[in-house]
Image (spheres, rainbow, N blue to C red):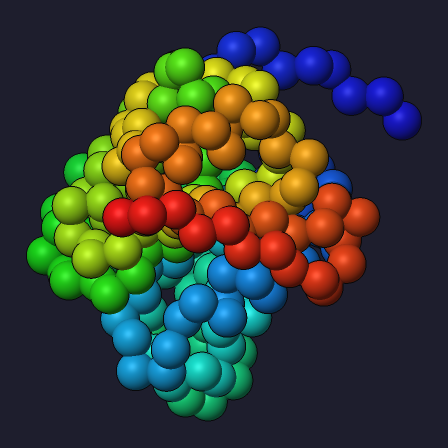
Amino acid sequence: GAAPMPHRGADYPFALRQASDIDLKRALAKAAAELIEPGESVFIDNGTTALAVAEELSGKGLTGMAASLHSAAALASKPGNQVVVPGGLIDHDDLAFTSAGAAEAVAAMRFDTAIIGTCAANPDVGLTVAGWGDAQVKRAAFASAQRVLLVSTADKFNHTAAHRFASIADLDAIVTTRNAPPGVTAEAHIAGVSVIEVDDAGADELDAAESPA
């Protein structure tokens, strides 16, 4: 059935997002997971694409802090990972930790890699999300990580949301699809951000475009 179009800054229900682009998100998640080595300390963001990455990382031998109960359960679904959650209140719909206490817990950690998702990533505006608390948790993850990977479907680069937490140039790498807007790839290359492109039909074939640091 038809669903109403959300206004700027609004969030889709988690179940609706989880049911969309399933194969594509799995392909993106596989590409992102291949960049993570056993033994790393990893932050896994909330959201459905980050959840797909968490599923790929289950049993890999990581220390993982998950920003949602969904991602925490996925990371812990097989033996091998040490899984930490920030604690505090959780959001009703997506079971995400977005309180001030969660941001403090993230800031107290040190991560080799942060896997970040976003509501929108328009290159002219930056990385934005619908919730203020979510933006604070993401900022803390950026500050605490040696490397930050944005894992995103191409449609996010055409949208904006209310709360900005970073720019494209703040990233170390973007994992997206070959149909991402050319402006995104161009800005990433200028900023020295690596772009890893997955076939937009959801195939496993990867094309890594590495930019000079």
Q: Residue furthest right?
A: 1
Residue 158 higher or lower than 172, as above or below: above
Looking at the picture, tell me which residue is in the foreground, 157 or 5.
Answer: 157
Residue ID at (54%, 55%): 208
Give the side of residue 83 with respect to residue 112, left or right: right
Residue 37 image point, x, y percent = 38, 77
In the rendered structure, the answer to whether residue 163 lies left or right of residue 142 reads: right
Tell me where residue 68 appears, x and y as whole percent: 41, 53
Question: Which quadrant of the view contains residue 64?
Answer: bottom left
Where is residue 117? Give x, y as percent.
Answer: 45, 43
Q: Which residue is drawn at 45% across and 82% down?
A: 60
Relative depth, front residue between 90 and 5: 5
Q: Report x, y in % for residue 106.
A: 19, 53
Question: Image check: 165 left or right of 127?
Answer: left
Q: Is residue 138 above or below residue 208?
A: above
In the rendered image, the vertical position of residue 191 relative to residue 44, given as above or below: above
Residue that lies at the very extreme toward the top in this rendered image = 7
The residue sitting at the front extreme is 212
**Residue 52 seen anywhere in this rendered image of the structure:** no
Going 62% across and 33% down the picture, which residue do you hit?
180
For this rendering, which residue is in front, 178 or 116? Answer: 178
Q: Is residue 173 visible?
A: yes
